[in-house]
Amino acid sequence: MRDTDYAKELARADIGGHRIERLLIKSKNEEEIRFSWWTNGRMANRPLDLSEAGLLPLMKEAIRERVFSDAFLRDLHSALYDCRPVRAATD
């Protein structure tokens, strides 16, 4: 795991240079999640752009690698369940 003056990497999911990372931001002493894109061992100075089909495996890997906290995953599950489209009575 990387440790720089800016942040210490706590967990990482990486698929082909597409990453989701849990970082400890040293100046704030606060944990944050970063979505990033890496090429040739360096972080690109552009945001991570993925299709939904590409994002889902990366999210699954991030869950397996414990990038997200249990509290976040519970809240995400609740949000997904609560936001489901309601089917019409005739469906």
Image (spheres, rainbow, N blue to C red):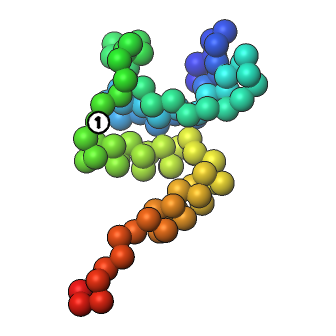
Q: Residue at x 50, y 49 (%)?
A: 64
Q: Position of residue 29 (x, y in %)?
A: 76, 25
In the picture as drawn, the residue positioned furthest to the bottom comes out as 90
Name the element at disc 1.
loop
Q: Is residue 45 above or below residue 91?
A: above
Quadrant, the C terminus: bottom left
Q: Is residue 87 above or below residue 58?
A: below
Give the quarter of the image for residue 55: top left
Q: Is residue 9 above or below residue 44?
A: below
Quadrant, the N terminus: top right
Residue named by callout 1: 50
> What is the count of numbered marks?
1
| Residue 20 visible in the snapshot | yes
Q: Position of residue 41 (x, y in %)?
A: 40, 14
In the picture as drawn, the residue positioned furthest to the right comes out as 29
Q: Position of residue 3 (x, y in %)?
A: 63, 16
Q: Is residue 32 left or right of residue 16?
A: right
Q: Amino acid at mark 1?
A: Leu
Q: Nearer the viewer, residue 16 or 72?
A: 72
